[in-house]
Image (cartoon, rainbow, N blue to C red):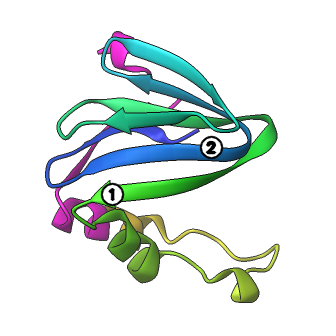
Amino acid sequence: MTPLHLHTRYEERFWVLEGGLSVWAGDEFVELRSGDYFRVPMNVPHAVCSGPTGCRALHISTPAGFAELVARAGTPAQLARPETELDLGLFMAVTAELGDVVLGAPGTLPSDR
């Protein structure tokens, strides 16, 4: 599950290809399945969690923003190993630079605010 967060410079869209995706966005909660689509507007606190069988989805940010976070703070799949760890300091620095605001730890929901 992602931390509770919001984006000040881009909106997010999810289109589920396989599996399931739970999305808490503001006052809304949706469980998306294959073929479902959901839009999270800018400045809306939200959290996302893949379903019990996982999820494959298209993630679209408009204007582009999330891709830069992944490129700068992520590990390419071909280089990932069991010992590969997230550099949380780098992740938080890049996310703040891109206008993202972390509002709570994973498991925190918009209704908890």
Magenta-colored span:
93-113
Viewer-closest of 53 and 99: 53
Magenta stretch: residue 103 in it?
yes
Left or right: residue 100 compared with residue 75:
left
Q: Quickly name the residue at label 2.
A: 16
Q: Position of residue 82 (x, y in %)?
A: 82, 73
Q: How many numbered tags mark residues here?
A: 2
The spot of residue 96 in percent (x, y) is 21, 60
Query: Which comes sooner in the sequence, label 1 or label 2?
Result: 2
Q: In the rendered image of this protein, does residue 77 appear above or below residue 32?
A: below
Query: In the figure, 3 relative to 89: above or below?
Result: above
Q: CA distance from mark 1 to mark 2?
A: 15 Å
**Label 2 neighbourhood size at 10 Å, few (<14), some (14-19), many (20+)?**
many
**Badge 1 local density, few (<14 within 10 Å), some, or many (20+)?**
some
Name which quarter of the figure residue 38 lies in.
top left
Whether residue 81 is visible: yes
The quadrant of the image that shows the N terminus is top right
Q: Quadrant of the C terminus?
A: top left
Q: Nearer the viewer, residue 102 or 66?
A: 66
The secondary element bearing badge 1 is classed as strand
Query: Viewer-proximal residue, 38 or 109?
Result: 38
Q: Classify residue 73 by image quadrant.
A: bottom left
> Which residue does the image show at 73% across and 80% down from the upper left?
80
Task: Return the residue found at the far bottom.
Answer: 79
Q: Which residue is mark 1?
A: 61
